[in-house]
Image (spheres, grey):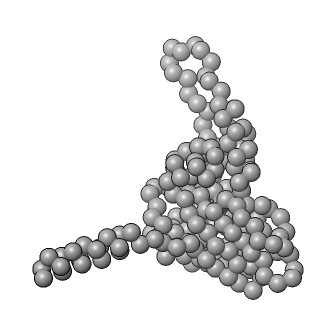
Amino acid sequence: MRNVLTITLLAVTALAADKKIGPAEASGDDLSFSATALLDRAEIQQALGADLGDGFVVLRVKATPKGDKPVRISPDDFTLLSRKDGERCPALSASQIAGRGSITVKAAKDQPNSWGTPVANGPIWSGIGTQVKRQPAPEKTKGDDAPVASSSDDKTDLLTALKAKSIPDEEIKQPVEGLLYFRMDGKNKLKDLTVLYKGAGGRLVADFK
């Protein structure tokens, strides 16, 4: 009897550990969307067809207009929030990640905003409350007179992949799917993330749970 109880408890524990977190979903009068998250670098590379590097969260989003009128949708409409520490990051465009003069975005924290979530003090970028700094140029090793290897080809390939897979920036009459790219600090668990949408389709909040 004791062995049976032990096996049962182990089975229940295993099922709880393997419980899958479903997509984040939200629906309003004019638009609904669902999002699945990619957190692992290898998983992101497989979906994108190029290596994005560390420190990114990618969402695969399906947006569906409701009603007869077209709805404008854009990556700029989406923000990713960590409920664990208040980190808040807007979706990045392909050119911001891999274009000429690409930037590093530091996610916002600390000061509440209209969503009731923290945003950073300091400079404001694109009205979303993120602090931005340009990536430093690669440093040459001391005593090495050889030219620094160019990564322009790699950046071009990445830029092409990012643009091809990104969710469109346009008016839609039919459901569309695409990827959204977010730069977030530290390790993030899926259960702690929330997708915020604010655009022509209204204002929606979707938790991963």
What residue do we see at 83% from left, 64% from top?
170
What residue do we see at 35% from left, 74% from top?
16
Q: Quick one: quadrant of the N terminus?
A: bottom left
Classify residue 150 by image quadrant. Answer: top right
Q: Position of residue 160 (x, y in %)?
A: 73, 44
Q: Position of residue 147 (x, y in %)?
A: 62, 18
Judged from this view, the residue extending furthest toward the bottom is 29
In the image, taking residue 200 as reference, residue 146 lies left or right, namely: left
Classify residue 102 by image quadrant. Answer: top right
What residue do we see at 78% from left, 77% from top?
65
Q: Position of residue 80 (x, y in %)?
A: 59, 66
Judged from this view, the residue extending furthest toward the left is 2
The answer to whether 43 is drawn above or below residue 74 in the figure is above
The answer to whether 179 is drawn above or below residue 5 in the figure is above
The answer to whether 53 is drawn above or below residue 169 in the figure is above
Classify residue 179 by image quadrant. Answer: bottom right
